[in-house]
Amino acid sequence: MDMIAEKFDAIVIGAGMSGNAAAYTMASHGLKVLQFERGEYPGSKNVQGAIMYANMLEKIIPDFRDDAPLERHLVEQRLWVMDDTSHTGMHYRSEDFNEAKPNRYTIIRAQFDKWFSRKVRAAGATVLCETTVTELVRDAKDKVVGVRTDRAGGAIFADVVILAEGVSGLLGTRAGLREMPKPQSVALAVKEMHFLPEDVIEQRFGLKGGEGCVIEAVGTISRGMAGLGFLYTNKESISLGIGCLVSDFAATMQSPYALLDALKDHPSIRPLIAGSEVKEYAAHLIPEGGYKAIPQLFGDGWVVVGDAAQLNNAVHREGSNLAMTSGRIAAEAIVQVKRRNGPMTKQNLVLYKTMLNKSFVVKDLKKYKDMPALLHTNSRNFFTTYPQLMSQAAQNFMRVDGTPKIEKEKATAAAMIKARSRWGLVSDAVRLALAWR
Amino acid sequence: MTVAVTLRVEEKLYQNRYLVDSGRPHIKVRPHERPSANLLGLTRVCPAQCYELNDQGQVEITADGCMECGTCRVLCEASGEIEWNYPRGGFGILFKFG
Ligand SMILES: Cc1cc2nc3c(=O)[nH]c(=O)nc-3n(C[C@H](O)[C@H](O)[C@H](O)COP(=O)(O)OP(=O)(O)OC[C@H]3O[C@@H](n4cnc5c(N)ncnc54)[C@H](O)[C@@H]3O)c2cc1C
Ligand code: SF4
């Protein structure tokens, strides 16, 4: 292992969205980059819904559409509020999304990450898979100067280490760089891949020529927990899953697979996946703590990016784009420091934070800074009571049974007040509006 | 009911690809008399149902089907009830799709 005796400009830990963005950006700027991935191949440990946002990838690889493994470009999004037998929905579909360079695509992470990693190698970085980084190495002044891995051989040194290790962030938490995620600031999501012929998917969702549709759903499917269900169309498969806060799982002792099976059996979902062949069952955490959970992002000889830094917008279900953007920005900051021959000290690496603060990443998270706490403390109302009331109101409105309309409206209003009280309704609405502001 | 659920999880895990590092489990449960609420909760909350209650009322783990999600770590590492590490490089869950 001669190569390992060399010193690198940068070591990247993890070959997910953020690590690949960082490694690619640094290598394309001529830095000598070594990247570690513990999986057999990049993507083998990673789970996503998955919607990928083109704009943030374009900033890294402008012509990615030429060869990236993309599933479908999205033309329709459905937001559903579900109770046990119904869904009330808001659907948005537009021909405008059939554009030359579509804005959002579904992807399959294992395939996408392999593609991204090929680009990283082509840009000149060295990528070592099947290697778990076990420890950060520090010098006498506590500066991070390298890593140790579970491969034979000693420490490997670099000017700077980029921790792109994902939501669990074992290394950073054990090295005391940040705290372990709290049960109320991470969601556990489970997901299945349902395979169906391409034309069946297109018929069921009214799609043609690579168009895609996604459904996101809240309601009694999460059994009172703060959670979200999703169904995304791929070329020849449907990704179906549900995630809820870990603290809620622990408090209610619900089983995630039971929730998933109930979702599959829901009368609104069942016909969409009928006859499919399930080929994988996956589970993964999602950061949900938002702005207030962002840890220290840089120090002497290190920066942290992506899910490891809790950079995830739970309200809009965005994560991979924040991961790619934080990886790219950290890399650009490192390239700038390097160009002026600056040491990779805390003082110099603050540049990453400064640049990140100006980007949509931190601005969006700041906008929703009060949302996690609101949904966490009020989950029963938002995820069970209101969905049930919405369903009742809709049914009351639509069913024609000879009851005068005025009485129907009174019954709907009375049901709302009975379930949540006038004051409860007003205060929930105000708190929601404030958190959304 | 428990039996039905167990069967269903095993059926699900059966679809997955793993490279098990035999004899080197990456998660261990500390010996205990009675499990805490969180540790007991894992018998239901772990998405791979790796945690089970034995006849003596203690929680045991068989980590072969583990998907390395980290949920048990978030709930039980701080209290010292479990010891959690990544499997050696290349071992463990290998998602085909993710
Ligand atoms: C069910 C689900 C649905 C989602 N849906 C969406 C969506 O639709 N759109 C969206 O934008 N985001 C979504 N997200 C979020 C998105 O997946 C994440 O934000 C994104 O993957 C974060 O990228 P990352 O690079 O920070 O971390 P990851 O992609 O998790 O990558 C971390 C990498 O580091 C490696 N690693 C960790 N520790 C070590 C170590 N010690 N040594 C070597 N390698 C190591 C891991 O193996 C992994 O490859 C979803 C997440 C989940 C779980
Ligand atoms: S990491 Fe996840 S799948 Fe593995 S044992 Fe813990 S809870 Fe279960």
Image (cartoon, coloured by chain):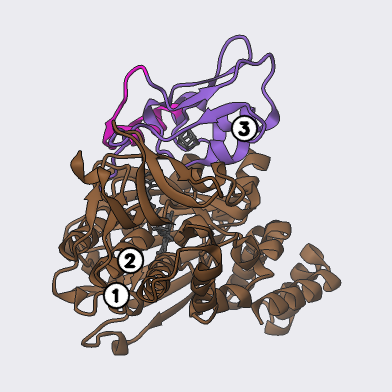
Chain colours: A brown, B purple
Q: Estimate how packed mark 2 is, as few (under 14), some (14 to 19) or many (20 or more) residues with alpha carbons within 10 Å.
A: many
Question: Residue A125, relative to residue A436: is it above or below?
Answer: above
Comes first in the chain, label 1 or label 2 = 2
Asked if badges 2 and 3 are on one and the same chain, I answer: no
Q: Are marks 3 and 1 in contact (CB under 8 Å)?
A: no
Q: Which residue is mark 2?
A: A21
Three-letter residue code for mark 2:
Ala
Q: Chain of mark 1?
A: A
User: Which residue in the structure is indicated by mark 1?
Assistant: A60
**Residue A338 image label:** none
Are the residues under marks 1 and 2 on the same chain?
Answer: yes
Looking at the image, residue A322 sits to the left or right of residue A196; the answer is right
Q: Chain of mark 2?
A: A
Amino acid type at mark 3: Gly
The residue under label 3 is B41
Q: Amino acid at mark 1?
A: Ile
